[in-house]
Image: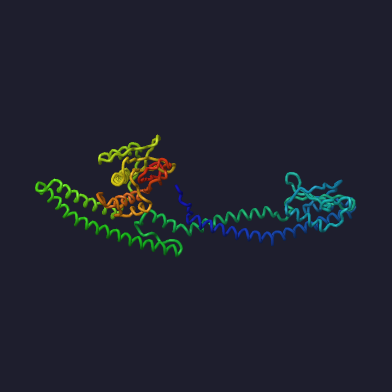
Amino acid sequence: MNRPPRSWSLFSTTALALIGSISVILIFALSAVTWFVMVPMAKRSADDLAALIVLSAQTWTELPKDAQPLLAAELKNQHGLIIQEIPALNRQHSTNLPYVRFLHDAVVRRFNQCPPDTIDPKTGECIYMGGLPQGAGYWLEIPIADDVLKFEFSPSRVGYKIPFTLGVILAGGILLTLILGLLLARRLTLPVSRLAAQVSLGLPDAPLPLTGPKETRVLIDAVNRRSAEVKRLIENRTVLLAGISHDVRTPLTRLSLSLALAQDALEAELHDQMQADINQMNQLIGEVLSIARGVNQAPLAWVDAHTWLAHCVASAAQRGISVQLIEPQTQAQFALAPSTAQRILDNLIDNAQRYGRPPIQLRRLETPDAHILCIEDHGDGLTPDEIITLSEPFARKDAARSGVTGYGLGLSLAEALAEAQGWQLNLYAPGAHPHRTLAEQPSGLTACLTLPKPTAKI
């Protein structure tokens, strides 16, 4: 069975559009700020620190040994730099932080005094940087004159933490974008969602409040006016048909009474035929009024599946129709309006008896989401085009117009009853039964009533 295409709500599409567009703008703005503002400022800050380090290294080599501790104390207290002499270069880079790379490159540009034996053959450099253990900071080694100096500084001395800054801006921007997008989408779509929910339940009993943007208020006002017009039309139609019913049934009642009084004067066959015609006219009037008045949703109740279906089969037997009940081994309970559901099944069984051929089968099927009741016969069935035509009131198959009673209203009324309850009534041509294999297909028409399983206990 083909599944309906997935549909998105107005809120979902609006929210995704807003969040997507704002996110694109945010990423573009963040990229521009990073490339044209943060990176140049980080390079400038790294260049300033590189100038301080190179100047401190040059000053260290020029000072006498007894004055070097004073310079080390001043650098530590004033600039957060720790300077010390080490025996040899470490010759290993151990960090890829963008600002640290900027600092390394700035020191390399300012320092052009690499002794020949300190140059790395791969990079052509003699300056190395890395991270201290446990994130305590960073170190930088410079060979100058006959000494190797090592500078250490804490992470707070690094002026710009580009990944951290970008992460904070991106996380904050995404969070604000989500909140802003959801709020805007909710504000724009809430009135329309309320309108759709009201209209899906039928014509609103009272005019809907005019809320939301101008276009939404115009739409709600149009729905209110059209709803009022439809209500007046239905009321006028119901009054008109009720008057016609009363005016027609009055002479029918007199005819029936006269026929009863003249029973002895008429032949039995003629009397029965005339009484049958009167009964058919009364039945037609009742079906027309049922459709004209509309149908309302009846309250649901839990019933045992086997017990209720056996009752429907027994009811059909009282009308002279033999129905075979076929059920799965599992027990089940239905949440349905018993009188409404039986009225629908009685109509389908009567149609199978009238237009199809036995055996007539009432089959119970079950899916994860619904219970399905199918009436199957072994007649000639209908074509898909005939199924569409027969859904209209007063429509009947041409072959049924001779020798078969009925006015073509029963199926329309059954569909209206099913729709009012939130059920689905579908007819399937021979070989098109969606719930049976090709070898198990009935030769006649199949009518299936789908009862969705409620999400909560009634």
Rendering coords of residue 190 (x, y %): 46, 57
Is 92 left or right of 256, judged from the image as shown? right
The front one of 312 and 170 is: 312
Asked if residue 261 can be seen in this view, the reply is: no
Q: Residue at x 60, y 59 (%)?
A: 24
Rendering coords of residue 268 (x, y %): 13, 45
Q: Residue at x 37, y 61 (%)?
A: 224
Is 428 left or right of 11, judged from the image as shown? left
Q: In the orientation shown, which residue stands out farthest toward the left?
A: 265
Give the answer, above or below, for where 147 lies relative to 361. Answer: below
Q: In the orientation shown, which residue stands out farthest toward the top?
A: 329
Asked if residue 317 can be seen in this view, the reply is: yes
Q: How is the image coloured?
A: rainbow
- Picture quarter with the C terminus: top left
Total marks placed: 0
Give the answer, above or below, for where 438 lies relative to 255. Answer: above
Rendering coords of residue 166 (x, y %): 66, 55
